[in-house]
Image: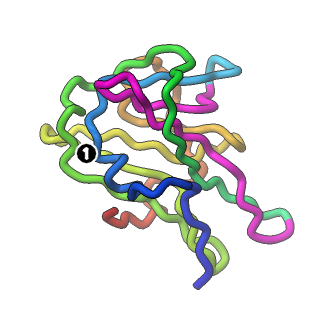
Amino acid sequence: MTRVNFEWNDPLALASELAQPIVGVRYLAEAPTTIDALTLVRPDGSGLLIRSEMAVLSSRVEVGVLSFQRVRCLEGIYGTIAPSFHDIKYVEKLVIDERGIRVDSGILLKNEKDNELIVVAAAMPCTLAVLGLISPAIDFSPEYSLYSYRRVTL
């Protein structure tokens, strides 16, 4: 089966990077109802920037795939998550199967208190759907129903 993997160009394993403590989030939004990019903020002030890119699978079929980049300069507006994401219990990737192609389209982080932070490609191209934010209060509108994603431990 053909795969479209997360975009991640770093020698450190993405699973290790995603399991790092999170003290907050920052987000970029061109419109009040979308999130164009999300940064998971670390205790040392660094962050992991997450964006959605479009993977063209065939004529008229595109699926969002997440891209990740370590960043030092944090841009955007502060958002709020549960404070207990300092201890992440496990990380899963959310995979969508579309026309015989497996696409890494999201992540799920679960903390010790079983709170979840889910980041997936949104229905609007090149935007993110984020579930688990306390603020901002933006509707969660993923590209696919959450039940359509296969959960794979990273």
Kind of residue sitting beneath label 1: Lys
Apparent side of residue 57 relative to residue 115 in the rendered image (left or right):
right
Q: Is residue 113 above or below residue 136?
A: below
Which secondary structure, mark 1?
strand
- Residue 48 lies in magenta, yes or no? yes
The front one of 115 and 68 is 68
Disc 1 target residue:
110
Residue 32: image quadrant is top right
Check the image and name the residue furthest to the bottom. Answer: 1
- Quarter occupied by the N terminus: bottom right
- Quarter occupied by the C terminus: bottom left
Q: Is residue 48 above or below residue 18?
A: above
Apparent side of residue 88 relative to residue 44 in the rendered image (left or right):
left
Check the image and name the residue furthest to the left. Answer: 112
Check the image and name the residue furthest to the right. Answer: 59
Residue at 51% x, 21% y: name it: 74
Percent across and percent down for residue 149 are 46, 62
Check the image and name the residue furthest to the top. Answer: 77
Percent across and percent down for residue 102 are 56, 72
Q: Which residues are magenta?
A: 34-59
Main SS category, magenta section: strand
